[in-house]
Amino acid sequence: MNAVIMLCLIQTLESRDVTHMQFTGWPDYGVPHSAAAFLDFMFAVRQKQEQRVLEASGSDQTDSCAAGPPPVVIHCSAGIGRTGSDSFIVYLLATSVLCCIVPPFARPIPSL
């Protein structure tokens, strides 16, 4: 599920669009049926982040992207470890990619 929500700070009338993406394939007290669906979701989040950077570079929000890409906030409604698991998987993918490329099995791996 994806939704775009506008947040507005009442004191300054500053507003930001927030993209909310929800992965529903990870049940409470269980595991996803397939790692592929979860990885697809993570790559979709990354693509949306890159899209938001491109959109902001052509608008008056350029200053907000000067320090890097928009942040990604991860949360779990039940507090049973999915947030930490998701964060750890993102970390592993980002830091371990170079260790996994061993000829003759080398293949392009998408950047995070």
Image (cartoon, grey):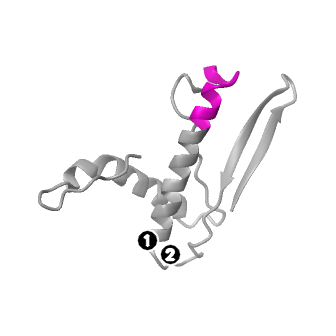
**Residue bearing the label numbered 1:** 35
Residue 60 in the image: x percent, y percent?
A: 70, 21
Q: Is residue 12 above or below residue 52?
A: above
**Residue nearer the viewer, 65 or 57:** 57
Quadrant that contains the N terminus: bottom right
Residue 38 in the image: x percent, y percent?
A: 49, 66
**Residue bearing the label numbered 2:** 32
SS class, disc 1: helix
Type of the residue with mark 2: Pro
Type of the residue with mark 1: Ala
Q: Is residue 19 left or right of residue 83?
A: right
At 55% from the left and 77% from the top, the residue drawn is 29
Which quadrant of the figure has residue 17? top right
Residue neighbourhood size for the residue with mark 1, other residues' Cα within 10 Å, grouped as few (<14), some (14–19), many (≥20):
few
Are dots 1 and 2 in contact, CB under 8 Å? yes
Part of the protein shown in magenta: 52-63
At 58% from the left and 41% from the top, the residue drawn is 51
At 52% from the left and 24% from the top, the residue drawn is 67
At 52% from the left and 64% from the top, the residue drawn is 81
Magenta highlight: main SS: helix
Residue 106 in the image: x percent, y percent?
A: 19, 56
**Residue nearer the viewer, 26 or 54:** 54
Is 73 in the magenta? no
SS class, disc 2: loop
**Residue nearer the viewer, 110 or 13:** 110
Residue neighbourhood size for the residue with mark 2, other residues' Cα within 10 Å, grouped as few (<14), some (14–19), many (≥20):
few
Q: CA distance from mark 1 to mark 2?
A: 7 Å
